[in-house]
Amino acid sequence: MPGTLLYLGRGRRGLPLRAVSDARATHLGGEPIEEKLLMRWNVVGRAQEEIGGFVRAG
């Protein structure tokens, strides 16, 4: 499934992977973010000022 993004839910202790040829995989995880987030293109922050700082620094 090239280019597929999957949400696997919470509470997993492992994630077995197998490929029949060369492959790449990315795994993102962590504690859920409870606060409201803002998104500007590919930048995520908690406030507009924070996003502006990231954009200016980038």
Image (cartoon, grey):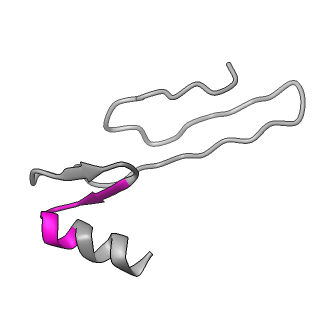
Q: Is residue 29 left or right of residue 53?
A: right
Of residues 10 and 54, which is closer to you in this image?
A: 54
In which image quadrant can residue 25 be found? Answer: top right
Asked if residue 35 is positioned above or below residue 18 in the image, the reply reads below
In which image quadrant can residue 51 be found? Answer: bottom left
At a point 52% along the width and 41% down the height, the residue shown is 14
Q: Position of residue 38 (x, y in %)?
A: 18, 52
Q: Residue furthest front?
A: 56
Magenta residues, start to end: 43-50
Q: Position of residue 58 (x, y in %)?
A: 45, 75
Q: Residue furthest bottom?
A: 57
Asked if residue 55 is positioned above or below residue 8 in the image, the reply reads below
Asked if residue 25 is positioned above or below residue 43 in the image, the reply reads above
Q: Residue furthest top?
A: 1
At a point 17% along the width and 52% down the height, the residue shown is 37
Q: Position of residue 48 (x, y in %)?
A: 14, 63
Is residue 49 rendered magenta in the image? yes
At a point 88% along the width and 36% down the height, the residue shown is 22
Q: Residue furthest right?
A: 21
